[in-house]
């Protein structure tokens, strides 16, 4: 959805609007320190800009990742100069021009990669504090109601290897489905609130309940229902993924009733304890 919006801005809007959209995409998706170090914005200030204390027109952007950098420049002509550079550290090894559409696709992917790396670093720091007893287990597993999409798309990266591999994959899919659905139901009232509860409560609470368990016990202990906690987690995520997919499909079809029905089904299953555990 974000990439589609950027491509529309590239074809339907003036260059300044697209540049602002790109900057906004970076600042929404990345922590402030990561965004400020990765993104360079160049401007041209006229005399009237100086006198009015305006920042000036944006003329070039450069977003840097670990091994490549993407630059976009608007030149009179008019034309876009969109380049991708292969880098080693701060040294540019090679560069080539690509089309604006190709550049926007690469830009969206690089922003997503940087967001994942930032989430992994943040999770590593949080786990270190958890081992010291400063933070409770799973405290880094959250989805901010003010900006759920970014947290949903990086939630799997924050899990690391503390849950089964199939659970990490499921969380990645669920996060993508819920983020897409939220974009489609924004401003719709009850349908939006239903999806937000699934995103900010049911999904992270389910994961935190599992992460609070001793790791060996979670992998090996057999619950009353015959499943280990790890298997029970995967089963609950399967149910959540199915409901999230149905809500996404209902949002695509603009079927508010179907979306709300799936929300009520989720509430019946996930509003109570996440895992029924006979702790030792």
Image (cartoon, grey):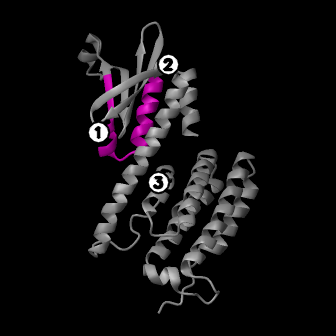
Which label number is shown at residue 261? none
| Nearest the eye: 179 or 224 | 224
What residue lies at 51% left-to-right and 79% top-to-bottom?
Answer: 219
What residue lies at 49% left-to-right and 19% top-to-bottom?
Answer: 14
Could you tell me residue 214's position as x and y percent? 42, 81
Which of pointers 3 and 2 indicates the residue nearer the eye?
Answer: 3
Label 2 Cα neighbours within 10 Å, binned few <14 / some 14-19 / many ≥20:
few
**234 w.r.t. 152: above or below:** below
Q: Which residues are magenta?
A: 16-42
Say if residue 132 shows up in the picture: yes
| Nearest the eye: 264 or 166 | 166
Q: State the residue position of label 2.
A: 14
Is mark 1 in CB contact (under 8 Å) with mark 2? no
Q: How many marks?
A: 3
In the drawing, does residue 56 fall left or right of residue 273? left
Tell which circle, 1 or 3, labels the residue nearer the N-terminal end.
1
Label 1 Cα neighbours within 10 Å, binned few <14 / some 14-19 / many ≥20:
few
Could you tell me residue 90's position as x and y percent? 27, 33
Gap in angstroms between the C-alphas marked 1 and 2: 26 Å
Tell which circle, 1 or 2, labels the residue nearer the N-terminal end.
2
Could you tell me residue 96's position as x and y percent? 43, 22
Q: State the residue position of label 3.
A: 154
Residue that lies at the very extreme toward the bottom in this rendered image: 280
Which of pointers 1 and 2 indicates the residue nearer the eye?
Answer: 1
Gap in angstroms between the C-alphas marked 3 and 2: 31 Å
Look at the numbered disc 2 and give the secondary structure of its residue.
Answer: loop
Q: State the residue position of label 1.
A: 37
């Amino acid at each position: 959805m974000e990439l589609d919006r950027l491509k529309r801005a590239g074809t339907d809007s003036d260059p300044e609007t697209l540049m602002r959209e790109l900057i906004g995409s970076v600042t929404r998706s990345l922590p402030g320190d990561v965004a400020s170090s990765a993104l360079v914005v160049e401007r041209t200030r006229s005399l009237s800009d100086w006198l009015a204390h305006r920042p000036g027109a944006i003329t070039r952007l450069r977003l840097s990742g670990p091994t490549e950098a993407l630059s976009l420049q608007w030149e009179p002509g008019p034309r876009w100069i969109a380049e991708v550079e292969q880098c080693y550290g701060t040294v540019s090894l090679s560069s080539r021009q690509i089309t604006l559409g190709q550049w926007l696709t690469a830009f969206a992917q690089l922003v997503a990669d940087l967001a994942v790396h930032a989430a992994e670093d943040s999770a590593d720091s949080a786990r270190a504090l958890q081992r010291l007893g400063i933070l409770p287990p799973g405290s880094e597993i959250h989805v901010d109601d003010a900006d759920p999409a970014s947290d949903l798309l990086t939630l799997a990266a924050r899990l690391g290897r503390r849950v089964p591999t199939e659970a990490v994959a499921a969380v990645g899919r669920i996060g993508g489905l819920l983020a897409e659905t939220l974009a489609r139901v924004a401003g719709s009232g009850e349908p939006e609130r239903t999806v937000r509860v699934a995103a900010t409560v049911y999904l992270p609470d389910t994961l935190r309940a599992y992460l609070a368990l001793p790791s060996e016990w979670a992998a090996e202990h057999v619950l009353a229902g015959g499943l280990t906690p790890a298997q029970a987690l995967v089963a609950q995520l399967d149910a959540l993924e199915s409901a999230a997919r149905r809500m996404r499909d209902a949002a695509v079809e603009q079927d508010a009733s179907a979306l709300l029905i799936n929300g009520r089904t989720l509430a019946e299953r996930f509003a109570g304890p996440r895992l029924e555990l006979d702790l030792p």
